[in-house]
Image (cartoon, grey):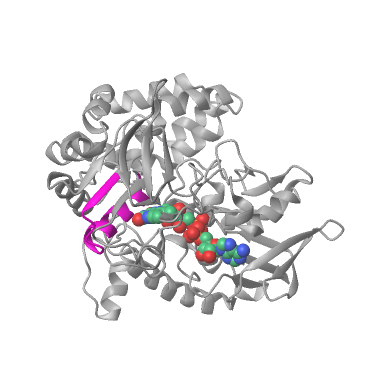
Amino acid sequence: MERIAIIGMGTSGMAVAAAYAKETNPGDYTIDCYDSKDSFGKGYPYRDDSQEIILNLKSGKISYDYQDNEDLINWHKEKGLTVNEYTSRSTFGEYTLDRLNETIDKIKANKIYERISSVQYLPETKTWEIRTESGSNIEYDRVHLCCGELGQHDVYKLGGSPGYYNEVYPCELKLADIESDQSVCIIGAGLTAVDVAIYLLTKRNVQKLYMFSRTNMVPTVRVDPVQINIKHINLDIVESIIKKGNGIIKFEEFDELFEKELVYQNINYTEFLKNHMQGGIEGLKRNIAEPDDLAVVQALLPPLNMVFNRVWDSMTNEDRFNFRSKYHPFMCLNRSPLPQPSAEILIDAVEVGRLKFIEGVDFVEYGCGVFDIIKKSTDTDEVLAQSDLVVNATGLDMYMTDIEKQNPLLAQMLNKRYIAIDKYGGLILRPEDQTSISPRYGSLENLHIHGVLASGVQYRNNSTMMIQTMAHKLIKKLYA
Ligand SMILES: Cc1cc2nc3c(=O)[nH]c(=O)nc-3n(C[C@H](O)[C@H](O)[C@H](O)COP(=O)(O)OP(=O)(O)OC[C@H]3O[C@@H](n4cnc5c(N)ncnc54)[C@H](O)[C@@H]3O)c2cc1C
């Protein structure tokens, strides 16, 4: 009987378990599911936290099962709870835990509230020995690596400075001691930074908040949805180009197809970038004031996720560079839009002078009880602002700079060369079956990489729905 381990029971671990429940018979294997109790069935973004921190998709558009998006609403009804337009991430975590427990019963898996401290490959038997934090060693035939908790990179080396916060989730735990009269500078402008800003403005009543990133680009605002019909680009068309190109699609070929689709959808790409991706609060205001073309882009991108994924897989390195140069910011800022209520809180805070975006920051330094936010100059450096506290909200460090500290299990696996870091972040894997490409052993057929850890190879997998889709595809392939 095949012995299977799932390491990490957040979004991707749950997706793997749910896929086994859909595609296999429980009697054919044993599955052990590992994670700490507070994260089991939730994962990093969905642990207990403030209700103000919400999902970026409306209720009815996100669920435990990507094939049934009504399920989150049904769960609210089962529990007698009111469904909000946007569910809090913490409530989403409670829901996924409930559904995971049902899956675990169905596949007769074992719930083990422990983290894994090391993994050892046994080349003679091609099996894996896993060591839990309490010291048990257990052997498995197949391992699903779903432990994509990567921590944040301390870009300005501020760790250890009094008043510096390098971790932010759960905000209610990590940021709870911030007082309303303290000035705070948030490093970052993405979804993590927005979460922190919303929490500090609404729950800590902070009166003086700064934010900055390299570009000050905030994700666009989710606007009222529209229905569109996609005409010129789909997976079949892309597959036939890839076949003709002996496994390769040129950037120009993709660009031509995508441009044609944009024209068909009445989107002028250059105008769109100028209007909707100007960054900061002005950008958010424009998104809300002129939502028509934004709504079309927001309807266009999600159904094309698998297309982008396949194209990314099949481009030369140079063309990947061209693809990223032209489309990456457009994809990133429009793929996980900001809920409008969150955008409105930020806009109000700017208008009453509680929040300010700072332009042109080069570095941040601590000294004499304050943080200086600095622009470099050949003469004297210019201090753009000062704050009592600094919160790092740069998001998960996909390049694993501080991995020994952040995730010792991954560090150990990297050191043993079972896994390797991809040029675009996450780990190197074979796209067809998500197996790790080990620099030492080659393709490891029974070590599968999922979720955040697969995000350099699986373009645009940073959503629960994509992670669930990919896990299901893999399990179907393995057990068909
Ligand atoms: C802040 C944030 C907000 C997001 N919001 C949304 C959203 O609103 N909508 C959306 O669709 N997507 C959202 N995403 C994207 C999506 O939720 C994530 O990409 C997804 O959670 C990643 O899944 P994962 O399984 O790779 O990691 P996680 O879900 O974080 O799970 C990793 C798990 O591994 C466990 N683990 C780590 N080390 C070990 C170990 N040694 N042994 C055992 N277990 C271990 C951790 O405890 C954790 O539970 C968000 C992502 C982030 C970071």
Residue 301: image location, x then y, percent: 34, 39
In the image, taking residue 410 as reference, residue 441 lies left or right, namely right
Q: Where is residue 264 in the image (x, y as percent from the top left)?
A: 26, 27
Q: Nearer the viewer, residue 96 or 115?
A: 115
* Span highlighted in magenta in the image: 190-210
Magenta residue check for 191? yes
Residue positioned most to the front? 368
Q: Quadrant of residue 77?
A: bottom left
Question: Does 447 lie within the magenta span?
Answer: no
Front-most of 377 and 121? Answer: 377
Mark yes or no: residue 7 visible.
Answer: no
Total of numbered circles in the picture? Answer: 0
Image quadrant occupied by the C terminus? bottom right
* Residue 210 position (above or below residue 84): above
**Relative to 42, 292 lies left or right:** left
Q: Position of residue 99 (x, y in %)?
A: 43, 73
